[in-house]
Amino acid sequence: MNVLLSSASKKVPLLLALKEAVARLDVGGIVTAGDSKQDVLTRHFCDAFWHMPATTDTNTSEIISALKQQKITHILPSRDGELLFWAKLKNQLKAEHIHVIVSNEKAVEHCLDKLQFGQSDIPAIIPTFCDLHHCDASRFVVKERFGAGSESVRINLNAADALVHAKTLSSPLFQPYIEGQEISVDAWLSENHTVKAAICRARALVINGESQVTYTLPTPSFLPDIITTLSSLKLSGPVVLQAIINGNELHIIECNSRFGGASTLGIKAGVDSLYWSLCETLGIDIETLPLTLANKKITQVRAATDYYL
């Protein structure tokens, strides 16, 4: 087994979790860190490093050829900007015995386009508009239509400030601002879009857009609604749904069809997403695998650590 972590960058916790999952299935298996930049942190922790071409259509032939040459068996995309590239190649690569851990093209496209997602008929979704004047609210959230771009999001703005910030964005979107606790839901779905497990977590400390302290939440009453929503989106593999809790009300923001920045906490809490994804490609019946979700709060603290190699 040779698993490629694409866009590995500085995602050391993800890479180490992936290595653990691989080792449980293949003691001789390796994890290859791939990135379009040479000087990335993950190259010091992987079994092999690939300075790969950018994941663009013009590089498709070169990438496929290199995948075969390096005997890559699995690919885990980890960046929003590459999800569609790999989703389009999923079936083609499967014919070459290379498994891509990503949802189908249509599902990925739907989640990446925040306007399309925000205007779908999903219950509890926060409505999303291109025009501020169509948004029935007094306070607003302004964000980019495409891409992660957490640093470009502004919340709780009045109309005037919302319009000013919108001018700094490429494709601005407007949502009503809703007070409450923002949560993330780590979930894993099979290829037939069945949710095996999901846990909720919240961020206690965020620095430069990344959560440094994250903790799990007790199983909320609306978790069945979240599971129904995820299944209806026809997703598969590891995903992260973002939402806001206001009292007993759930307000869905968006969904990322990939492993999240703090989804290693989800693994710790029992959503064994990377292992399950690999098992499924090997023909193992996921329903037969044990499932034990944490029954108490777990806090993840992410801090700089010194390593000596």
Image (spheres, rainbow, N blue to C red):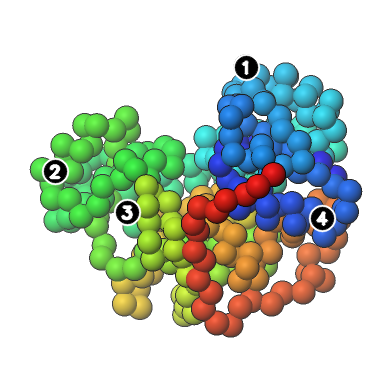
Q: Is residue 129 left or right of residue 256?
A: left
Depth check, front residue: 4 or 49: 49
The label on residue 23 is: 4
> Which badge, 3 or 1, is on the more N-terminal residue?
1
Q: Secondary structure at mark 3?
A: loop
Q: What residue does disc 3 label?
A: 127
Q: What residue does disc 2 label?
A: 161
Q: Mark 2 is on which residue type?
A: Asp
Instruction: Give the residue drawn at x 31%, y 72%.
Output: 246
> Which badge, 2 or 3, is on the more N-terminal residue?
3
Mark in the foreground, 3 or 4: 4
| CA separation in Å, label 2 and label 3 | 20 Å
Q: Secondary structure at mark 4?
A: helix
> Which badge, 4 or 2, is on the more N-terminal residue?
4
Where 126 sits versus 88, above or below? below
Q: What residue does disc 1 label?
A: 58
* CA neighbours of label 1 inside 10 A, class few (<14), some (14 to 19), many (20+): few
Mark in the foreground, 4 or 2: 4
* CA neighbours of label 2 inside 10 A, class few (<14), some (14 to 19), many (20+): some
Q: Position of residue 219 (x, y in %)?
A: 51, 78
Q: Secondary structure at mark 1?
A: helix
State the quadrant of the N terminus. Answer: top right
Mark in the foreground, 3 or 1: 1
